[in-house]
Amino acid sequence: MEERPKLRTIDIVPVQFDGRPHLLLRDPLQLTDKMLVVSPQAGLLLALLDGTRTLREIQVDLMRLTGELVMSEQIEGLLRQLDECLFLENERFKEALAIAIAEYRQSSFRPSSLAGTAYPSDPSSLRAMLDSFFEPPKGPGRPEGQKHSKPLKAIVAPHIDLARGGATYAWAYKELAEAPPASLFVILGIAHYPMENLFAATTKDFVTPLGRAQTDVSFIEALNERCGFDLLADEFVHRYEHSVELQIVWLQHLFSEVKIAPIICAGFEHLVEPGESPMSLAQVRGFVEALQSTLNEWGEPVTVIASVDLSHVGFRFGDRHPITPSILRWLESEDRLFLEKVATGDGEGMFLLIRADRNSRRVDAYPALYVMLKALGEIKGEVRHYDQSVEGRNESVVTFGAVVFP
């Protein structure tokens, strides 16, 4: 057992077990399929596993927090369970991660991580599911031939699961289907796991139940050469990242063949000094300039897809209050203001909204939106749809929208 144990980045989800609140622990990298369900009291122990405390110091701090003595045997028992699940940042975890990274790099493609869970693994069932989201009254109606003379510059679509956000996806993709298909779709997803750099690409093709989407390696290589940092250093994070995969499924449903450039963006608001633009960060500036140059010199039409969810509020995300109608109205007002900034192409104004309240709504979308708007320059779009998905018994809410840039 490590002298100063450290919990690595894992998913911690509030759940009900035997009628009482618990915490579900699971691995976002899926190095293991093992999960743990622990009490909220054990959650205090998890918060102390930051790699700075010995077992004795953890015990003392728990005593201070709870007023109760937790026996060292109990702490050691939980630590053993965490270790068995690869939830501790130690040599055992690092070895498993190294093996998984090597296997991914050797693979000729990136397999679906969601087929059979987030969407059907049967192609016909998947197509029927996607078609259903176009249906009114919530959906926009089926695509009706070409209404645009050239490919769209960009769209903003959700990355929430299809069951909850399907109609909002359809509002974005209907317009994409009513335009000539681009020769390449640059997909800007969101990192849901820490990365070494702020941006990560992969050269792997993506395989889903609807076929194989070819990654344009030449585009990725051209982009990487201009970045000033290794865009492939965090390639493995793509292995289980859903924000890119869900866009690919829609593209495959609408078009017979698609070429993609999959990129994941990490958060950076905590790195930007007050009053400064994100362009003051070397990696943000380097990536934006590299993307802009690569797009300008590509010579063929490209559509950029920003894979975006908006606010994340409620118990699941660490808030202490339930979701009320007044909170939902406030969120819609703030989200629509944010989306209007996006639609007017105002990347700096959009980011200022994030900084103004220290991203209290936990908008995970802004990195993809910011770099898209900065790279594409003066573009104007329209907000096509907005929705909110309330979870459980008004415990949490995730919001999302669709924006189209002709």
Image (cartoon, rainbow, N blue to C red):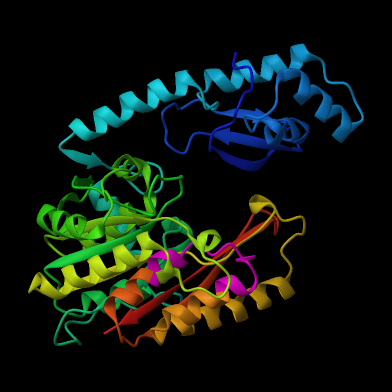
The N terminus, quarter of image: top right
* Residue at x 11%, y 60% (from the top left corner): 257
Image x and y of residue 390, in percent: 61, 62
Image x and y of residue 99, in percent: 31, 23
Q: Is residue 237 above or below residue 376?
A: above
Give residue 135's quadrant in the image.
bottom left
Let me know if residue 363 is in the magenta part.
Answer: yes
Image x and y of residue 406, in percent: 26, 85
Image x and y of residue 297, in percent: 11, 72
Q: Which residues are magenta?
A: 354-370
* Residue at x 35%, y 76% (from the top left corner): 373
Query: Is any atom of residue 225 visible in this view?
Result: yes
Q: Answer with left or right where residue 229 lies relative to residue 220.
A: right
Q: Nearer the viewer, residue 174 or 342?
A: 342
Give residue 218's quadrant in the image.
bottom left
Q: Answer with left or right where residue 319 lies relative to residue 224.
A: right
